[in-house]
Amino acid sequence: MAKRPQSQVKKEMQKMPYEPLLKIEKSLILWSLGIGAVLMVILIWVSYAFFPGS
Amino acid sequence: MEQRRGIGEDWLAFWLGLLVFLIALGPLAGIDLLGWAVRTKVWTDIGQALSPVAGSYSLGGFSALLLTYVFLVALLTAGAWLLKAKIRRFVAAFTVVFWVSYICWILGSYANIAVNTPADMQKFGVTWSLRLTGEAGYIIALIAGLVVGNLFPRFATWLAEGTRTELYIKIAIVLLGAKVGVIAAEKLSLATVVMFRGLAAIIEAYLIYWAIVYFIARKYFKFSREWAAPLASGISICGVSAAMATGAAIRARPVVPIMVSSLVVIFAVVELLILPFLAQAFLSHEPMVAGAWMGLAVKTDGAAVAAGAITESLILSSAAAEGVKYQTGWILGTTTTIKVFIDIFIGIWAFILAYIWATHIDAKKGTKVRATEIWERFPKFVIGYIVTFVLLLAIGIGASPTLMKTLNAATAESDNFRQIFFVMTFFSIGAISNFRKLWEEGIGRLAAVYVVSLFGFVIWIGLVISWIFFAGVKPPLAAG
C-alpha cells in the first residue's frame, strides 16, 4: 500500500468544494428507492409464490 | 489490493482456482492427485493433528503439510510471476503467511477450543470446550494478523507481497463453487430457492443502500459528488471493488477510492469480529438468514465470505449442542451466493453511474460510456465460481450413489485447499488492517459517515432484507 503524508486526508477534506444536490442526483436517489420499494413487493411475492422456502 | 500489472488478480484467481479444481477431479478418472494434501483434525495430542486428506496415502502428517506448502508455494509463485510481483519477496512473505496461518489453523482444532457436542467431548476426554469447531483457526489467524498489522507495522509492510487477501479469497471462492455445486445437486430445489432469493436480496440492497448512503453523505456530511459516490458504493455495496469501480465510473481522482478503501478494510474487520457472534446469539434458529446477512452487511469479498465461514461454524455448533445437525456448506454457500451476485452487479451499477455522470453531471467533458465497460468491470474470478458450480451441479444431478460418493471425495480435496486459502485470507486481512489509520488527522468526517451509515442502517437493513427473503429457509439435516 502506498504511503501518504499524514495530512493528505485533512487536505482533501479541506479543499472539498460545496456542491448542492442537483436535480439529477435527487432523481437518482428517488428512482432508486422507488424502484426498490416496487421491486420489494414483486420479489417477495415471486419468492414466496414460486420459490417457497419450506 | 487489485494489481493492474501483469495478468490481474481476478484472472489469476480464475486460472489457479480452476487448476486446483481440475486436479481435484482426478478421482472421477480413477486417480487421486491431491490426496496427499494436509488435513487438520481435532486433537489433544499434536501428533494426531495432521494427516493426508485421503486415507489411501500413507504419509506422515508433517510430510503432508510440507508437501502442501511446496505445492502452494510453486503454484502461487507462478501466479506471482504472472502478476509481475517481486518473486523473491513474494516467496519469503508467502512462506511466513502460510506457516503462521497454518499454525493458527492447527491451534484452532485443539479439542478444548473446537469440539462442540457432548459425544465429541467424551471422545476426546475433555470436560470443557469453547465449542467453536475447528474453524476457530480462522479467528486465531485473524487475531495473529491484527497483532502483526498493528503492533509490527514494519513487518506487516515487509509481508505485503504475500498478504494478498483478495487473491486468496477469490481462489477460495472458485474452489467453493465446486462444493456448493455438489450440495446443490443433492438438494436442487433448495439451491434454486437460495439463488433466486439471494438475487432478490441483493437487488433490494443495491437500490436501497446506495441511495440512502449517497443522500446522507451529500446532504448531511456535505461531501462532494466525487467523494460521495465511491463512499456510498464502498459502504453500501461491496467495499473495495465497488469503491474502485465507482471511482473509475465517475472519473474520480485515484486518491478518492483509495482513501475510501482503506476505511472499508478497517470496518470490515470490525464487522467480522462482531457480526458472526451476534448471528450466533440471535439467529441460530434461522441459519440461512444469518448467512445472507453476512453477505449483505460485511463489506469486501474476503471479510464477507470469512464472516460467512465463522457464522456457519458457530451456528452449526449451537445447533449441534441442541442435537440438530445441519449439513455443512449451506450457510457459507448463501453468503457466497449473495456476495457473488453483488460482485456481478458492480459492473452494471458502475455502468449506470458512469452513464448518469457522463450524460448529466459531467456532460461538458463529452465523455461517452461504452457498454463494454460492464465487461471491463466484471469481476472475472466469478466466472471460475460459475464454472466449478455449474460443472459439478450438472454432473451431480441424477448421479448414481457411487458417482456422488466420488464427487464428494473430489470436492473434499478441493475444499481442503479452499480452507487453507481461507485461513491465509483471515491472517492477511488482519495484517493489512492498520487501526491507527482511524487516528489520522482529518479522517473523522470520512469515518463519521461510515459509522453512521454502516452501524446506523446498512447492517440493520441487511438484516431485515435477509429476514424477509430467508426466514423459514433451513439447511438440510446432515445424513446420519
Image (cartoon, rainbow, N blue to C red):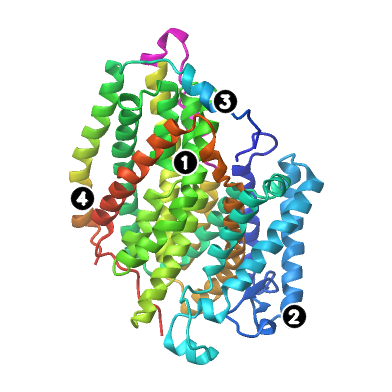
Which class describes the residues within 10 Å of circle 3: few (<14), some (14-19), or many (20+)?
A: some
Q: Are marks 3 and 2 on the same chain?
A: no
In the rendered image, which residue does mark 4 sit on? Answer: A44
Which residue type carries mark 2? Leu
Name the residue located 45 percent from the left edge and 46 percent from the top edge. B299
Of the residues under marks 4 and 3, which one precedes in the sequence? Answer: 3
Q: Toward which corner of the image does residue B83 lie, by quadrant?
A: top right
Q: CA distance from mark 4 to mark 3?
A: 46 Å
Q: Do pointers 2 and 4 mark residues of a single chain? A: no
Residue pictured at 26% horizontal, 22% vertical: A26
Residue denoted by label 1: B239
**Rendered location of residue B158, percent (x, y):** 73, 46
* Residue B59: numbered disc: 2
Q: Nearer the viewer, residue A12 or B204?
A: A12
Toward the top, the furthest residue is B364
First of labels 2, 1 by sequence position = 2
**Chain at numbered mark 4:** A
